[in-house]
Image: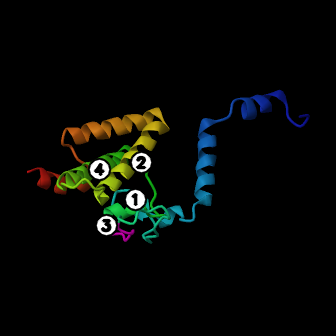
Amino acid sequence: MLQHVKETLRENYELPSQQRAAAEITKFWHSGDPIKQGDLKVSIISGQCSGEPVPMEDKPLSIVSPNCSNQSGCLWCKNMRDIDSLDYVWSLASFRHLKTIEAAGITTRETIPADIVIERLTKKMTSFKEGSKKRKEWVDEAEMRVAEGDYHPHWSGILEFLEE
């Protein structure tokens, strides 16, 4: 306590810099991630991944194992990383709409893989929605776009084809 003057206490401890704190938190989380930032690639559902599919322990048996060619498998891959952006949330909402169309075409009362994928996507979007006010706005915007038929470019071709 005797090592600092009052000004040091006020500048560095009482009123911390939000920007510096955010940068330090980001560095901390990146240092613990086994995948280095420079090694991340764009995943097939517009997230990020290492390109090495590794299934999670909780992956349902009816869902295809991650293989970097099946979008549903990405949702249960240890190396998949969400992106904190409106574009990514819009991609999730568009993918969920695609799976909803797929599930609607099957007339069985049993749970099908598309139902499980829809549930997983809904949980991801709920997590974004509960994360902050800004992320809630992203989810609301993404859901509104999909409801209007404005799909993420990654999914628009197949969705527009299916709706014709």
The residue pinned by badge 4 equals 96
Majority secondary structure of magenta residues: loop
- Going by the numbered disc 3, the residue's amino acid type is Asn
**What is the secondary structure assignment of the residue under circle 3?**
loop
In three-dimensional space, the C-alpha distance between marks 2 and 1, rounded to whole angstroms, equals 9 Å
Q: In what quadrant of the picture does the N terminus appear?
A: top right
Extreme residue in the right direction: 2
- Going by the numbered disc 4, the residue's amino acid type is Arg
- Going by the numbered disc 1, the residue's amino acid type is Leu
By what rule are the colours in the image chosen? Answer: rainbow
Query: 62 or 30, which lies in front?
Result: 62
From the top left corner, tell me how far across and down residue 7 is, in percent: 79, 28
Give the magenta-colored segment's residue range. 64-70
From the top left corner, tell me how far across and down residue 92 is, in percent: 33, 50
- The answer to if 143 sits in the magenta stretch is no
In three-dimensional space, the C-alpha distance between marks 1 and 4, rounded to whole angstroms, equals 12 Å
The reply to whether residue 149 is in sight is yes
Answer with mark 3 or mark 4, whichever residue precedes in sequence. Answer: 3
Q: Residues within 10 Å of mark 1 (few under 14, many from 20)?
A: many
In the visual, does 150 lie left or right of 66?
left
The residue pinned by badge 1 equals 75
Q: Is residue 125 above or below residue 79?
A: above
